[in-house]
Image (tube, rainbow, N blue to C red):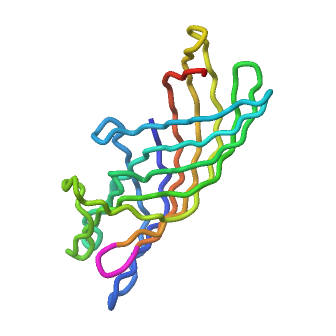
Amino acid sequence: MVYNIPTNLSVYQDGEPAIKMQARFRTEPFTLPVYWDIRLGIAKGSRLFEAELIHHKLYLDNPNAWVQKFNVSHGFNILLVNYGFIYNHFRLRFGLGGVIAHPESKIRDLEFGNSTDDWDMGYYLTGPVFSASADRFFTLTKAIFFIVGAKTTVSVAKVPVSSGYARFTNIAAHINFGLGVWF
């Protein structure tokens, strides 16, 4: 489950005045392609070193006459390098990284990107991201554990649109659960 805090969206197109609006995004985590979060790491004593990839998705919930569609639904992909600590059955971590996004938009009747075309490989490195998270793991077997956690991500993005670009910040609160494996 993810909640995206409303933030400013600014659109700049050649020869047109800038569009500035408050954007409200929803996530639709179970719509294909589904939301997921994968971490691979190593623990040295009580310290954690991890690489993390989150497949986050954004759908503009409040389109208007100028911004008819603004989605990053084939991935607002967050790539992080995390550093953290283990305390009892809790893990606390901070991460820094970048966002690789696949934007689809229709602005002033001009379309960009195509989420229905599997061959549209329009992925762009869009900006930095910071993450803070905490989770609790429950040992199921010697090698498998169940995890419940909360995470905040703050990212700044600049994505292409037809005849220009858009800038926005995404501040999201994530609640995750799933299985993990000790190697």
As rendered, which of 101 and 172 lies closer to the eye? 101
As rendered, which of 100 and 111 lies closer to the eye? 100
Seen at 31% across and 42% down, the residue is 33
As rendered, which of 182 and 173 lies closer to the eye? 182
Count of residue discs: 0
As rendered, which of 48 and 24 lies closer to the eye? 48
Seen at 44% across and 68% down, the residue is 9
- Dividing the picture into quadrants, the one containing residue 86 is top right
Seen at 47% across and 56% down, the residue is 6
* Residue 84 drawn above or below residue 145: below
* Residue 106 drawn above or below residue 79: below
Residue positioned most to the front = 183
Quadrant of the drawing holding the C terminus:
top right
Helix, strand or loop for the magenta stretch, by majority: strand
Q: Position of residue 181 (x, y in %)?
A: 55, 21
Seen at 20% across and 74% down, the residue is 109
Q: Position of residue 107 (x, y in %)?
A: 27, 72
Check if residue 12 falls in the magenta segment.
no
Quadrant of the drawing holding the N terminus:
top left
Task: Give the residues drawn in magenta, as a range.
Answer: 161-165
Q: Position of residue 161 (x, y in %)?
A: 33, 73
Check if residue 163 falls in the magenta segment.
yes
Q: Is residue 90 left or right of residue 70?
A: right
* Residue 119 drawn above or below residue 43: below
Q: Position of residue 138 (x, y in %)?
A: 61, 15
Residue positioned most to the top = 141
Residue positioned most to the right = 45
Q: Is residue 48 left or right of residue 52?
A: right
